[in-house]
Image: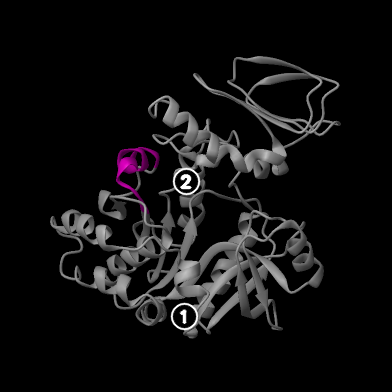
Amino acid sequence: MQNNYCIIMAGGAGMRFWPYSRNERPKQFLDFLGTGKSLLQLTFERFRRIMPAENILIVSNCLYRDLILEQLPELKSEQVLLEPTRRNTAPCINYAIHRIRAKTDTANIIVAPSDHLILKEDVFLQIINRGIDYISKNNNLLTLGIKPSRPETGYGYIQVEEGKANLCKVKTFTEKPNLELAKVFVNSGEFYWNSGIFLWNLQTIERAFNAFLPEVNSIFEKGKNIYGTLQEADFINDAYALCPNISIDYGVMEKANNVYVICADFGWTDLGTWGSLYEISEKDENGNAVLSCDANFYESANNLIVLQKDKVAVIQGLNDTIVVETDNVLLICKKEEEQRIRQFVNEINLKYNGEFN
């Protein structure tokens, strides 16, 4: 347990949950489920059950330092690794790995996003412990795959070779497919959703970075005598200016030939869009889902309504629509068009000089 570490990635902007998620407080810091805890707090507490709190690192944008320490008072400030700019997941993971290396020569490492929902936490932690046992004895890269329940176009997919006890060798990774291809994937029985949760031991991931992203690894390697000192922030500012914008999936996992996957079901949802939140929300007999407010429906079906808690909504003749209101923005968008929200945000920010970002 003392050699187990977790890297929680919490730097995303959450633009697809606009206007509820804003640049100053993106979705990982919000309570979507009415539990009184943000997605980040739920993620931290989940891993806190299986490892010391001091072995959990949060990697995030420098904008969110105070917010993270406010929500996670158990953390020391040195456990919050601050990125000066967003460079995708490969640089942030490499930074955290070098931070761990500065502390220990031996570590089992879990990498997890901060904004995923896990409904079966006990099952999930059993699987994580099984994965930790595996990577402690094998020099392979491990990920978790989710058996698909529908032909989802918003997730990446993992094609697997035959394995045993739900542990399979990865054949291919595929980015978000179109609907027809997603249907083929699901019907084949060979594809699983890519959860974005990874496990590996320190030496194995270091070798993988040296093999597939040596330019990124060399940038952070130059700071090996700086991590944990007062000079770290200045070093990281310079390092990120040199880093490419590249994901761990594309930069390492898709290129390596020693990648395995545990195929499991632990109630996983990537809360990436309003549509994904609608899928897990309680609905009335007409498929309407309501969060926070009180909504009354007439001749309306399959809507998601998110208003402020003191609001009462009357909805008539509306179908398959997302309605979200905050203090200064009202969004009304067809569910099938929600991929355009990012476009709407960009255009609104240009029109109003970033006032509603």
Q: Which residues are magenta?
A: 59-71
Q: Position of residue 219 (x, y in %)?
A: 25, 69
The answer to whether the residues at label 1 and label 2 have Cβ atoms under 8 Å apart is no
In the image, is residue 29 above or below residue 134? above
Badge 1 element? helix
Q: Earlier in the sequence, mark 1 or mark 2?
A: 2
Nearest the viewer among 120 and 26 is 26
Q: Is residue 124 left or right of residue 348?
A: right
Q: Is residue 97 left or right of residue 109?
A: left
| Residue drawn at 44 percent across, 43 percent down | 13
Dot 1 crowding, Cα within 10 Å, few <14, some 14–19, many 20+: some
Q: Position of residue 189 (x, y in %)?
A: 78, 72
In the image, is residue 332 above or below residue 78? above
Task: Assess whether residue 61 is covered by the magenta stretch.
Answer: yes
Residue 122 shows in this picture:
yes
Q: Position of residue 351 (x, y in %)?
A: 44, 26
| Residue drawn at 49 percent across, 42 percent down | 14
Pick the quarter of the image with the N terminus. bottom left
Q: Position of residue 154 (x, y in %)?
A: 64, 53
The majority secondary structure of the magenta stretch comes to helix
Name which quarter of the figure residue 221 lies in: bottom left
Name which quarter of the figure residue 72 lies in: top left
In the image, what residue type sits under mark 2? Leu
Q: CA distance from mark 1 to mark 2?
A: 27 Å
Q: Mark on residue 39? A: none
Residue 21 shows in this picture:
no
Which residue has dot 2 on it?
40
Which residue has dot 1 on it?
136
Pick the quarter of the image with the C terminus. top left
Dot 2 crowding, Cα within 10 Å, few <14, some 14–19, many 20+: many
